[in-house]
Amino acid sequence: MSRGKFITLEGGEGAGKTTNLAFIKDYLEQHNIVVVVTREPGGTELAEKIRQLLLDNKSEAISEQAELLMMFAARAQHIKHVIEPALASGKWVLCDRFTDATYAYQGGGRSMKISTIKWLENMVQGTLRPDLTLLLDAPVEIGIARARERGAFDRFESEKISFFESVRRAYLLQAELYPERIKLIKANQPLPDVQRAITDVLRTLLGLCALNCPTSSRHGTVK
Ligand code: Z5A
């Protein structure tokens, strides 16, 4: 049995990850692919407990180092108990955020050293990397306005605009560094257009692309 594929969805506040996760799952299932949908931080009982601690905005102040290590502690559990077994059994894994979020939030937002994040990535993940990452990118104000409609803010969502600007810049840098893996999707357009761009990328991944492949720029942007 061939190994499944690992797809991650990334983006800032309110970019539309959760909304599009269901769309992608349906699309893959229509192509007879068995999909495991999961998220980070989280995905196992213990990792979900770590998530609660990380998002709780009433907890004692969490140091930047503790935050980074908690992300990777949750990730280690998630990989061992959910991601690796699913991929090994031929299922595809669709994950709402993964390590690009660590580069963006802890690296960009909290200014943690990239070399430290890379060291932890190698230690926890070994050679595991996503096969495809869809980066939903929208101006910070648009994402925040969308997220605000949802109500109460968690510990991350309570950060200042400048934090989210740094997160966005770090995500865009990741896309520039890994254009083969990370496909940039403009998320500040109507949902049907976002989903058309996502479908174009998935068609390419599934090898369904004949003459009508999307034109990708050097940075992998799909319009
Ligand atoms: N975090 C971290 O710091 N380091 C890490 O390594 C990892 C995570 C893995 C939890 O993430 C937090 O963990 C996250 C980063 C940190 N904190 N933040 N911020 P999360 O993914 O659970 O939380 P989130 O980013 O806050 O998700 P979100 O706000 O729910 O965003 P979303 O899933 O991208 O958006 P959505 O719920 O799909 O859409 C929001 C609204 O916009 C909704 O009403 C939609 O109907 C609407 N929407 C979506 N798309 C459109 C379009 N195209 N047009 C109009 N309206 C739209």
Image (spheres, rainbow, N blue to C red):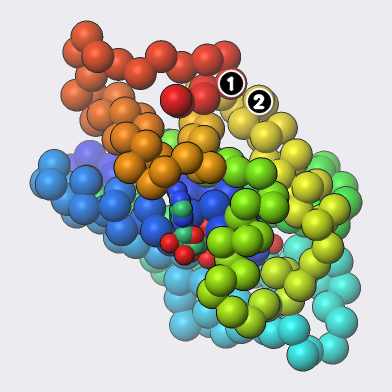
Image marks 1 and 2: residues in contact by CB distance under 8 Å: yes
Can residue 154 be seen by looking at this rendering?
Answer: yes
Residue 67 position, x and y percent, is 77, 69
Task: Look at the image and tell me whether residue 129 can be seen.
Answer: no
Which three-letter amino acid code belongs to the residue tagged 1? Answer: His
Residue that appears at 54% across and 52% down? 15
Of the image marks 1 and 2, the number of the one nearer the N terminus: 2
Q: Which residue is mark 1?
A: 219
Q: Residue shown at 30%/49% (left/top)? A: 24
Task: Determine which residue is flagged by label 2.
Answer: 176
Q: Image quadrant of ligand 1?
A: bottom right
Secondary structure of residue under mark 2? helix
Amino acid marked by disc 2: Glu
172 over 45 or under it: above or below:
above
Q: Residues within 10 Å of mark 2 (few under 14, many from 20)?
A: some
The vertical placement of 23 against 156, above or below, is above
x, y percent for residue 29 = 17, 50
Query: Which image quadrant for residue 198?
Result: top left
Where the N terminus falls, by quadrant?
Answer: top left
Residue at screen point 52% across, 25% down: 221
Circle number at residue 6: none
Examine the image and state in which quarter residue 131 appears. Answer: top left
